[in-house]
Amino acid sequence: METSEQREFVDKVHDLPLFKGVSDEEFTSLLAACKLTYYRRSEKVDYFQTPNEGLFIILRGMAEISITDDAGTSIILEAIQEGEIIGFSNIAYYLGEVNRPLDRHHLKMEVLEDSYCLQIPFSVVKQRLAYEAVRDALLKNMSTRLANVYASLGEQAKSAEEWGVSTPYVRRVEDLMNTPAITVYEDAAIEEIARIMVERSISSLMVVDQHERLTGIITEKDLVQRVIAQGSANSFIAKEIMTKKLYTVSRHDYYYEVLATMYKYGVKHLPVVEGERLVGVVTLSNLLSKRDRGSMGILKTIEEASFNRLPVVKAAIYDVLSNLISDDISTIHTLEIITKLYDRLARHCVQSAIQALEQQGLGLPPVPFGWYQMGSGARGEQFMLTDQDHFLVYADVDEENAEQIHHYFAMLGEEIVVHLEQAGYTRCFGKMMSSEAIWRGSISQWQQRLRTWALKATDNYILLGYNFLSFRFLYGNASLDKHFSHMVQEQLKKSQTFLYYMAQQEQNKPIPQASQSFLALFKGKGKREVIDIKKHALFPLHHCLQILGVHKNIINRTPLQLVDGLVEKGELSVGFADDIRHAYEVALRTRIQMSWKKHLRNEKITTEIQFESLRQWERDELRTMLTTVHTLQTHLLAKL
């Protein structure tokens, strides 16, 4: 039986220009050739590897499209919302052109919120393009989208010319908004609204009452759905077609707060208000076109850093971190920004290591490979450079060439360590680095290694397992990464006993409940009450999420992504997941603030906190955080 949701999707597809005018029988036949796919928030999709994949239409949700060249350079093209089409770049191919414009580049789609997308194959697109009305409708859609893309790229090119100019890394709405906002009164006619939009080249208008108070917004989408679709434009005024439910922002809000609001509510235009006064409007295009402006200087520093200048990058990133902390940006947003910079630095080090081997006469990597981070870097928690945690994986090789290939990757592993060390990453005391034989190998070698860890399950192997399970792919061949990740998932399915032993270790490291003598387990030297934020909070939280993730076949995720995945799988309730996210942010914020202060005072950085130095509300917050971690630990032990 067809569900209401399915019926909703079918109706949306039927109303698309691509399917206008077809009979019910023909529509059913065309729809049967299409494929409906669900994508999770933050999921990344490689798109248009072949032209036969056709077009994508977002039926529900939102995604961001970027284009990446072979060197890994990525540029944001646009954000796609409900009802919009992805894949216009292939229309020329469908109309008979031999070459595709993106054959030497890669389109990537990153899902910004849980989304349903309909894939329309080449066969269906080609069939519908035979009709003039369809071609005209697509041409209008493409023209608008092309204008938006050109505007975005133009802004990014303009920003690129400003490298070296001192601009704030974190911007507020007043730096981004269009002002003054273009307004119409509630009784304005449709003809006037359309004329203003065309003359001003804008895609939204603010609606105000006689007292100049904001009462609504009209976008191009409103015009299409509420006017053009009705076929009687003369009978409408602004008040009747405007969107009355408004989401507004302040001119003092930060860039990332505004972007989060847009993604959360699925809007592209936000009025900027000061009290009851309308002072401007900020659009998604504003944000996307300027998103990298403040980071241009640091990105240039990273990309152009020679081996001798790698230490300069650390100082530049620390300057960004200092600004974020002093501006009181949320911990999660701070780490999102800093992680992207560290990721870029790490990739640069790997690429430079490959070039160094080539200059030594060893050539390029002989087989596809992948380089993975572990530890805080993989979890997206690294705010200051720490020790190295990483490993190498490469394709299986035949016996004849095995020795030569193993030797190459041994050399590459050591060269990567040297470059990372030069950039400021200290060598791992436990030698969990790709320079060590145990942390590099072919896919088959890694499979045997995981099997050994699971069968023996010693304390040392469990420790290795914990570190390994935080892995995140950062550089190399994407197809090999998929093969490797699939192998890991299959191997872990066969290793339930190993998971049980990992859970048992958590049972031996209990987190105190608030109802207990809370500080009883946190006694330090001289009977001072202390807590180790890593040992007593972050590590137990990470381990519990890792084990639950493996239990539900979820790997290669950051902690917050694991929480989202466990909610989706029904393992965690929405309310409990919110508590975990809050506890996670409290633990991270506490660690960052404490460590940064010690860094500024040039003191040894530790993760221990003396309770006597905290204010009462800070103690209460830590109590609540630890109670949540204890509850998560109890939940895990009940499962396994």
Image (spheres, rainbow, N blue to C red):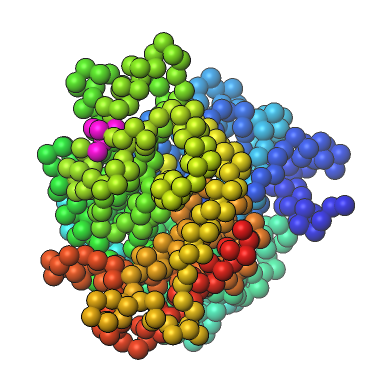
Instruction: Give the residue drawn at x 30%, y 22%.
Output: 408
Rendering coords of residue 181 (x, y %) = 42, 70
Residue nearest the viewer, comparing 511 with 88 = 511
Above-or-below relation of 504 to 272 = above
Left or right of 50? Residue 373 is left
Residue nearest the viewer, comparing 73 with 631 = 631
Instruction: Give the residue drawn at x 45%, y 25%.
Output: 395
Quadrant including the C terminus: bottom right
Rendering coords of residue 24 (x, y %) = 85, 43
Residue 622 covered by magenta stretch: no
Q: Which image quadrant is residue 495 in?
A: top right
Instruction: Give the residue drawn at x 25%, y 53%.
Output: 386
- Furthest residue toward bottom: 616
- Furthest residue toward top: 400
Write the start and end of the magenta stretch as one range.
413-417
Left or right of 602? Residue 622 is right
Instruction: Give the residue drawn at x 27%, y 82%.
Output: 527
Rendering coords of residue 637 (x, y %) = 58, 63
Above-or-below relation of 177 to 551 = below
Task: Please identify the dominant SS of the magenta region.
Answer: helix
Above-or-below relation of 9 to 639 = above
Residue nearest the viewer, comparing 88 with 568 = 568
Residue nearest the viewer, comparing 466 with 159 = 466
Left or right of 10? Residue 545 is left
Observer able to see residue 322 = no
Rendering coords of residue 403 (x, y %) = 35, 17
Q: How many numbered marks have been drawn onto this rendered protein structure?
A: 0
Observer able to see residue 392 = yes
